[in-house]
Amino acid sequence: MNLETILFYFFATVTVLAALRVITARNPLHAVLFLVLAFVSSAGIWLLLEAEFLAIALVLVYVGAVMVLFLFVVMMLDINIERLREGFWRWLPMGLLLAALIGVQMVWVLGAREISSGMAPVKHAADYSNTKELGRLIYTDYVYPFELAAVLLLVAMVAAIALTLRKRRDAKRQDIGKQLKVRREDRVRIVSVPSARKASPVQDGVSAPNGHTAD
Amino acid sequence: MEAQALHLIQWLLSQVGLWDALRGFIEPVWPVAWIVVKILVIILPIMGAVAYLTLAERKVLGFMQVRPGPNRVGYWGLLQPIADGVKLLFKEIIIPTGANKFLFVAAPVLALVPALAAWAVVPFDDGMILANVNAGLLYLLAMTSLGVYGIIIAGWASNSKYAFLGALRSAAQIVSYELAMGFALVCVLLAAQSMNLGDIVRGQHNGYGLLGWYFIPLFPMFVVYFIAGVAETNRAPFDLAEGESEIVAGFHVEYSGMGFALFFLAEYANMILISALTAVMFLGGWLPPLDIAPFNQVPGLIWMLAKMSALLFVFLWFRATFPRYRYDQLMRLGWKVFIPLTLVWVVVVAAWMQTPWWLW
């Protein structure tokens, strides 16, 4: 058993246990954190497969951005865990059936000897850049599917924004451009107010109690 | 160097006659031990730099506000960081009622670990790098984006509203500025045509000194990256996650003793990291500013450290100069100014590189 195998079993165990805890943790926040752990350990498995771009992109996108927003939302929500647990036993057979289906599928696809022997990973030299190779494939052979997927995501994003966008008429907003354009003359008016009466010479030099002169 | 170090150990041990007894133990673990040694050689100076950066900050702020700064402990206050460290070490660690104990203790560690892990791919000189990985730039982006977990978890686990508000502010802030930071790095990636940080520095070497550095063609990105870096490290004027005038001390309000010290270390380690990265990607890393006799004989490490120090001074200068941003202003700057600017500049750089006027 070499180091790679040991590392693989370590990451695999952590991934499976963390994934189990995602659905069994009582506290939703803990579930999210276990999901983060599952992502990190599957990134470790991808690193073992020399897919460093995918592994780091997984950490960067899912762990660094998506899960942060997830945590954000879960912290703000008041989730009643008891209500979520209702109907667990009723839906259990259905869930088990689905799980068995996925299991059978995976064994069927991955277990076939003749395929998996042909898929033995090829070791590359240290200067081989996975990222460059991936970029070349995406932008040459698979350019249309890739652009299609990108447009699809863009449409989904625009749609999500359009659905939630509503102008509040009663809210007061700042228009920074307008604020910056403001000159002194727009806000301040200097008025020269003549003093009401001249101070009489008798009062000159007499200090008020607060130390200022009476004028 | 690895082999020489092993020889040195062999020589030392054979002087006392222990080499033959220990040989079977040392030789198999030597590669791992050597990596640990290299890690320590990076981490320990960073820790020292963090300690003295706190003193430098107080001194610089002091001078900018026409007062002497700390000057009671040691000459010019030079022992002040040690006094502070000892004080924090001996303080009681208070865990608030209702806090999630495990996460409360784990959060400062989660804040510090990515800040230190990112140093693995930072080149200090030609070849002076812990892990020369090809996806270095991506790794850095991933590591700097992980630091926010420490802050969010600390805010949540403290069971305190101030801490929670600080954590939420920080989460939104870091996710917003990461996009601008990522696009700025895409420009660097385009210019250097490599994600290896060593190659990025080598791409800035064209014999004309500082004219070859990327801050000239990528000047807007240089500014955006540095400002986004200030925002990512939660430093003034973007320190809304702490915001002591509004939410006491934000995410670390409930921390005392070493928990607080770890957050402090993480913040300053991140500052040094952002300075190092800005120096590597825009200011030519270890390259001298003029490629002529007295300058290019100075070791590259010195140039690198000088550039980092100058950028760190800018961090402190910012803090002394600018008032804190309001939250909506911060979001506006990130989403409405930086992201459109970086998006446009990516296209500009890509088009520019196709023309004969691209000189880098």
Image (cartoon, helix red, strand yellow):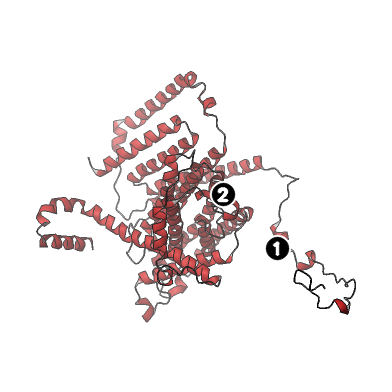
- Work out whether disc 1 and disc 2 sit on a shared chain: no
Disc assigned to residue B144? none
Assign the C terminus of chain A to one quadrant of the image.
bottom right
Assign the N terminus of chain A to one quadrant of the image.
top left
Circle 2 chain: B
Circle 1 chain: A
Q: Which quarter of the figure has residue A19?
A: top left
The residue tagged 1 is A180
Q: Position of residue B15 (x, y in %)?
A: 11, 62
Look at the numbered discs 1 and 2 and tell me whether their residues touch, using CB distance below 8 Å: no
Please give the count of numbered marks on the rendered protein. Answer: 2
- Name the secondary structure under disc 1: helix
Residue depicted at 34% across the width and 66% down the height:
B126
Q: Is residue A5 above or below residue B122?
A: above
Amino acid, disc 2: Arg
- Name the secondary structure under disc 2: helix
Q: Position of residue B60 (x, y in %)?
A: 50, 69
Local crowd size for mark 2, using a 10 Å CA cut-off: few (<14), some (14–19), many (≥20): many
Front in this rendered view, residue B247 or A186: B247
In three-dimensional space, the C-alpha distance between marks 1 and 2, rounded to whole angstroms, equals: 26 Å
- Position of residue A96 in the picture relative to residue A193 (left or right): left
- Position of residue A190 in the picture relative to residue A136 (left or right): right
Residue B357 can be seen in this image: no
Q: Position of residue B163 (x, y in %)?
A: 53, 47
Residue B146 can be seen in this image: yes
| Mark 1 or 2, closer to the camera | 2
Front in this rendered view, residue B116 or A167: B116
Front in this rendered view, residue A173 or A112: A173
Local crowd size for mark 1, using a 10 Å CA cut-off: few (<14), some (14–19), many (≥20): few
Residue depicted at 29% across the width and 53% down the height:
A125
The residue tagged 2 is B169
